Image: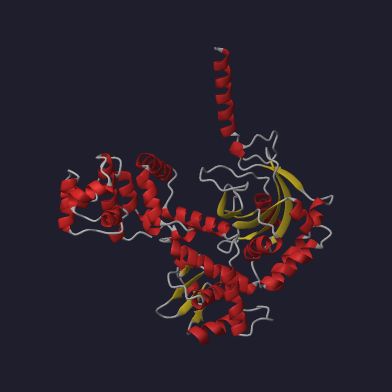
Amino acid sequence: MVKDIDTLKIILGLKIQQLRKDQQLSYQQLSEKTGLALSYLHSIEKGKKYPKADKILSLAKALDTEYDYLVSLNANKRLQPIIDLLQSDFLKMFPLETFGISTTKLIELMAEAPDKINAFVSTIIKIMRSYQLQGEDFFKAALRSYQDLKDNYFEELEEATKGLREKFDLTTKRFKDSNIFEKILKEEYGITINRQQMGSIPALSEVRSYFSPKKKILYINSNLSLPQENFLIAKELGFQFLQLKERPFETRMIEVPSFAKLLNNFKASYFSVALLLDKEEMIQVIQSMSKWPKWNNQAFIAFMDQYQVTSEMLLQRLANILPYHFGISDLFFLRFYAGPEQEKFEMTKEMHLSQLHDPYGNQLDEHYCRRWVSIHLMQKYKELQEQKNYKAPIAEAQISDFFGTDSSYLCITVAKPSHDYTLHTTSVTIGLLVDEKLEQLFPWITAPGVLHQQVNNSCERCEIQHCESRAAPPLVIDIQNKRQEVKSQLGRLE
């Protein structure tokens, strides 16, 4: 994170470095002209020192420039994009340190080749504007990259949940209700729970919970299921136990002003799920799945009932345990949402480990392939709702063979009604790359009868012929074909 005072130092250093190089002056020559020590000049250019006014005057005279230019926040055309970036929120908020990137080294790189870096920065800014990308889009992308960097397994959080279990003697307990967590919050942290007030305010009907640090009250929406309530209370316990100060107070986050807040929200969520789904028990769940003769929808749903967790919590926990304990690291996680008409399916969450897998989200308002089990199961759920007023979650597995590639994924999906509106549907999916390791873990994926489906990313980019599920014409493919035809005809003119 770059602070305001650091920005002033860096800008001055960049200007002096550029002027010195433009005039082909060495450090020794500039030292002789100004009377400043070599080490001191080096520290100024690196943005580590900000000299007093008299020394800046000496530098301005030696470099044949104005004092006001050196101390201002404006620069010439070559440096201005870098200065604009320094003054923006990007370097102030973007979590460079999280990824082991030194801000100083980054600035040095920018200063070494300002023309190329400026072009790159300008390109990024233009893309952001064209696609209406906001700061929170970068924060969310950074969090997904951070999860990938750690294989979505965080040992320090696993140890923290283990410590809480041992401290409060929870090592052998299954959480069939929220009383245990509620008692710990009250006795250990002085936090009480209010389940009535939020539901009486119409504008808050879609907000799941809110924590008031002043009143030390956790308000919970009364229309939540027991697994959802368990998650939220355990999550608040995570905020308190991990002593996460910079945090959101509402669920889900209304806005994302900083990466630190988003990261701490993720840590508390991870803590909650790890507390409710103990690592050792999850290993046993996966081992039991490996012994199935074939995929079993009901047995998978039974895991949710057994541990009193939601489908998203169960699949997220699989995405924690499979990479670290079973070596299954090529995977993705998706969450979809659709209104009652199901005219549009919106991807509201995604995570990719090891590589950017197909399918993936896009910001182009294209129609996601209806052959994905993620969407197919939501359509099936809508039919069940219309026929039987169905409310329980349903599960399905599919081997998705991605068109035009050699990649196939075992996709496990659970669909259910949204907690906000019962006629809205949502689905969560974990996709596991089919390879030798996965076939050894789940031998039943090669058995006869396992559903295979050829899929693509979006209808607009799909070349599959005679697709019975197509929701839009292949417009992007048509454009590409027309361009290819133009190239072909131009070639004949040679």
- Whether residue 402 is visible, yes or no, is yes
> Is residue 425 or residue 121 the one in the foreground?
121
Q: Nearer the viewer, residue 362 or 465?
A: 362
Left-right relation of 69 to 191:
left
Above or below for 210 versus 53 = below
Residue 59 appearing in the image: no
Task: Please determine whether, in this image, residue 86 is positioned above or below residue 291.
Answer: above
Q: Quadrant of the N terminus?
A: bottom left
Task: Give me the residue at 68% from left, 41% from top.
Answer: 469
Where residue 297 sits: x, y (%)? 76, 60
Single out the residue that lies furthest toward the bottom: 187
Residue 272 coordinates in the image, percent (x, y): 58, 72
Query: Compared to 489, does 43 lie above or below?
Result: below
Looking at the image, the residue that sits furthest to the top is 493
Name the residue located 24 percent from the left edge and 51 percent from the top edge: 73
Colour scheme of the rendered structure: secondary structure
Residue 323 screen position, x and y as percent: 66, 60
Number of residue marks: 0
Task: Name the foreground residue: 92 vs 111.
Answer: 111
From the viewer's perspective, is 484 left or right of 3? right
- Quadrant, the C terminus: top right
Residue 62 shown left or right of residue 222 in the figure? left
The x, y position of residue 412, in whole percent, is 70, 56
